[in-house]
């Protein structure tokens, strides 16, 4: 049996993280063509990931199999203004597991690692956006105990009715 290690990401992981991000966007684009990005998106994503690695208020965990990154999760800690009872909350920005490794518990292990870090940061809740046209995404999060709270709606400016 192949062992999957969950660990914090390092700068050496950036090429793998960018590749997984691209795989995640391609997967979502198959459900929703609005998942399209500018030609320099990969460079911007790499910059964002590097900034995240340097941040004290964010973490990236990777799933590593024999030195190869097969998945990652990116989470950040945010604070709401005092009028909200939620206070400090965790936000899951990204999660991706390479297609060949899905449905083997890798995503769940990544979420557990991030949850442990969120707990150490004393967050009171965890939030995320799930692609509404991707049924696998919604099902994954529901199994982990997430429920609808707010719905992000979008209209392209200049779109026809």
Image (tube, rainbow, N blue to C red):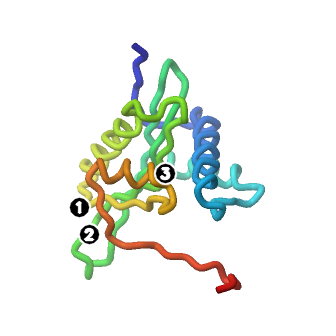
Asked which quadrant contains residue 32, the reply is: bottom right
Residue underneath mark 1 = 124
Q: Circles 1 and 2: CB distance less than 8 Å?
A: yes
Residue underneath mark 3 = 94
Sequence-first tag of 1 and 2: 2
Q: Is residue 63 left or right of residue 127?
A: right
* Image location (x, y in percent) of residue 66: 50, 18
Query: Dot 2: what SS?
Result: loop
Quadrant, the C terminus = bottom right
Q: Nearer the viewer, residue 144 or 17?
A: 144
Q: Circles 2 and 3: CB distance less than 8 Å?
A: no
Look at discs 2 and 3 and give the one toward the viewer.
3
Tell me, for residue 133, which label it has, or none. none
Q: Residue at x 45, y 32 (%)?
A: 63
Residue at the farthest right position: 39
Q: Residue at x 42, y 34 (%)?
A: 103
Asked which quadrant contains residue 79, the reply is: bottom left
* Image location (x, y in percent) of residue 4: 41, 24
Q: Residues within 10 Å of mark 2 (few under 14, many from 20)?
A: some
């Amino acid at each position: 049996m192949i062992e999957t290690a969950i660990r914090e990401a390092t700068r050496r992981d950036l090429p793998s993280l960018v590749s997984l991000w691209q795989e995640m966007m391609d997967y979502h684009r198959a459900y929703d063509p609005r998942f399209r990005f500018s030609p320099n998106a990969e460079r911007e994503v790499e910059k964002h990931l590097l900034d995240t690695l340097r941040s004290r208020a964010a973490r990236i965990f990777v799933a590593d199999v024999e030195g190869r990154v097969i998945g990652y999760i990116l989470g950040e800690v945010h604070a709401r203004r005092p009028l909200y009872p939620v206070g400090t909350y965790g936000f899951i920005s990204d999660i991706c597991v390479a297609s060949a490794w899905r449905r083997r518990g890798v995503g769940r292990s990544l979420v557990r690692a991030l949850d442990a870090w969120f707990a150490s940061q004393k967050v009171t809740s965890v939030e995320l956006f799930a692609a509404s046209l991707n049924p696998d995404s919604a099902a994954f999060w529901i199994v982990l105990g997430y429920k609808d709270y707010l719905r992000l709606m979008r209209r392209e400016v200049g779109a026809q009715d």
